[in-house]
Image (spheres, grey):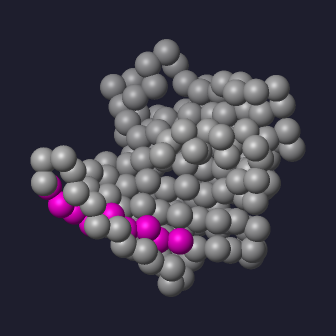
Amino acid sequence: MKIAAAFVILMLATLAVGQTSIGPFTIDAPPPNLPQCKPAPNASSGGEVCTEWSSVTPGERTASIWNFPYPDACLQIDLMDVGTIQHIEGTFEDAYCVQMSSDLRKKFGVPMVQRFNRQNAFGARWTETSLRWNRKGVHVEFYLGADGCALEVQTPRYYNDPRNRVAEAAHF
């Protein structure tokens, strides 16, 4: 329960009016100074929030933020050549999705909602929901699916970069 309560506080934290932040990560701002991960970044290594940096392309850095917002979770942040966070994404266990959806609605207000009916080859049916908020200079999207949820926050600079459009197309 402590983790869920801490998550609510982190999700609702906003550094200043006009800025979009998810916990300690603020879009268009430098990343917070978090400790570097030890070799096994997961709950069994203490569950402490830590960072694993990697370079994707020259001038761009990506970090995996382990154990945020809960043990064993992983949030991805991307810094472009400007050195500030331009993209945040993560997938989360089903047990956290309803609370996250509620927290995001409290933080960003009423979203645009789209529902998609899905069916797999075995005939199982389910509905996926997309919640979207378009804020000044930032696009926030939260997906609720059959087996968890996903959060994506991005700036127009990140979205319009051709390297990211190609990578995004490969996901679909």
Judging depth in this view, the residue of 121 and 97 nearest the camera is 121
Residue 130, position as x, y percentages in the image: 43, 67
Q: Residue furthest top?
A: 39
Position above or below: 126 against 52 = below
Quadrant showing the N terminus: bottom left
Q: Is residue 125 magenta?
A: yes
Up/down of 109 relative to 170, above or below: below
Nearer the observer, 35 or 137: 137
Residue at figure coordinates x 56%, y 34% from the top left: 64
- Residue 15 lies, in percent from the top left, at 70, 65
What is the chief secondary structure element of the magenta stretch?
strand
Seen in the picture, residue 138 relative to 56 is either above or below; the reply is below
User: Which residue: 26% across, 51% down?
Assistant: 147
Displayed quadrant of residue 55: top right
**Residue 165 position within the rendered picture, expressed as x and y whole percent measured from the top left:** 67, 46
The residue at the point 38 percent across, 36 percent down is 72
- 83 left or right of 54 in image: right
Can residue 1 be spotted in the picture?
Answer: no
Give the farthest residue toward the right: 82
Q: Which residues are magenta?
A: 124-132
In this rendering, would 5 be left or right of 54? left
Q: Where 34 falls versus 159 (above or below)?
A: above
The residue located at (13%, 54%) in the rendering is: 123
70 within the magenta span: no
